[in-house]
Amino acid sequence: MLMKKSAQASLLLLTLLASQAYAFDLLEAWQAARVYDPQFAAARASAEAGRTKSLQAQALKSPQVMLNTGMAGVSSDNKISNAQFSNAQFAGGGAGASGTTDFRTRTDAGLNLNLNLRAEYPLYDAARNGSATQLNKQAQLAEVQLTLDEQQLMQRVAQTYFDTLLATDTLATLLAQQATVSEALASAKARFKEGDVAIIDTHETQARYDLLASQVLEAESNLQLACAALADMTGNQDAALVQLPQKTKLASVANGDLQSWLARAQIDHPLVHAQQLQQEIAHTESGKFQAKYSPVLNLVALAGGERLQGLGGSDADVTNRQLSLGVQLTIPLYSGGMRDARYHEALALEEKSRYQTEFVRQQAAREARSAWLAVTAGQGQVKALEQAEHSAEIKLDSTRVGRDVGDRTTLDVLNSEQALYNTRLALYRSRYQVLLALLNLSAAAGELGEPRLQEINQLLNAK
């Protein structure tokens, strides 16, 4: 009774999963994952942060305005000797008199107030220009990384989607096999009571049924886990999926020869683009320190003033005002060897980046080769398994006839049924693997996007 209830629950689960009223396909699953998947949401936030690098680059080439103000209590004593004066009345002299005198201002307790507004505009700064270039490259790198994350999300969605379909097929196949074995068990028991067969047929059939019962429980668990994984990515808790038709044609899912795929992968793989940008950033870093004496020329405007306010009765008040506009030239003459050291470090890192670019190209070619072989070999395997399924069906029919005339036993029929179901599961698995390999091949060539996903989706929706 417990086994019967478990089988009924499994059939109900499969019925819900196969319901087309609420089913959604691979493309819809991908579109839902773009909105819901937390891993891709983090990738979008990272890309948004990367886009601000271009704004930072613009800021480096824009004027910089700074306001400084302060207040402090001070005591000061300033003395000026032999100060010259002219065209003023001084020490009893008349108009137009001139001469020299001494000045002294003293403040024992005063308050110093200062306010300065400074604006700088870079006219020439190799390091600043290099940093701006690097920031723009980093903004481009963020976009390339987002493209890579988007492709990886497509692959993850497809992998989880097909895992769920395979788990559904596995459970359905086991339930069908269990129903067949259940009928054989009832027949064996009835024939044993009538004395037509030995008890061994009943025991062997019972053992096969018990084994299938445990496999059904495992398949139910795997299906629930697969559905939960897809729900985590798409937010759809009742993910009823569109099934792949039994007679799916996979002969023309990949076009082009291996060499063309390898060539595109070495140029257009997102990781290759990302590494090329990293190499350009490293090259710019070495250029920032290439010139031993790299001058910095800025246009500088300054407006400000300072006031010393005496607090005592005999304390002096001093006011200074300043307004200037000019250029400022800075030349680093000696930095203790720091500039040369950083230049040699940048050269070494640039060389490292060149080797990494070559390695990434090789890695992209390996991924493309592996995926292309998986597609082409998988297509051949699907054809072979389709023929094997047809042969297994013929063998099963022959074995059943042989059992009816006494040439075959019930165990022979069960073994033939087991071979047929195993072949079908292998066929289902191979079909999904070919479709996943096609997506991996497209990703390796930098061509994975909604158009390619739509092609796969049309196979699911084919009547």
Image: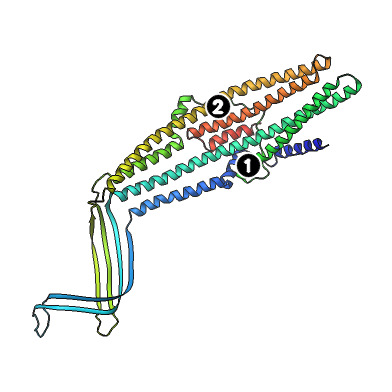
Q: Earlier in the sequence, mark 2 or mark 1?
A: 1
In percent of the image, x 29 and y 59: which residue is there?
120
Could you tell me which residue is drawn at 48 percent across and 32 percent down? 445
Residue assigned mark 2:
375
- The residue to which callout 1 is attached is 229
**Whole-number angstrom distance, CA of label 2 to CA of label 1:** 26 Å
As drawn, 233 above or below 411:
below
Label 2 amino acid?
Answer: Val
Instruction: Give the secondary structure at mark 2.
Output: helix
Q: Quarter of the image containing the C terminus?
A: top right
Tell me if mark 2 has few (under 14), some (14-19) or many (20+) residues whose alpha carbon lies within 10 angstroms of its own.
Answer: many
Residue 114 percent across, percent down from the top left? 30, 71
> Which is nearer the eye, 29 or 384?
384
Say which quarter of the image contains residue 222. Answer: top right
Residue 446 spot, x, y in % from top left: 48, 35
Residue displayed at 31% across by 45% down: 342
Question: Which amino acid type is shown beneath numbered disc 1?
Answer: Ala
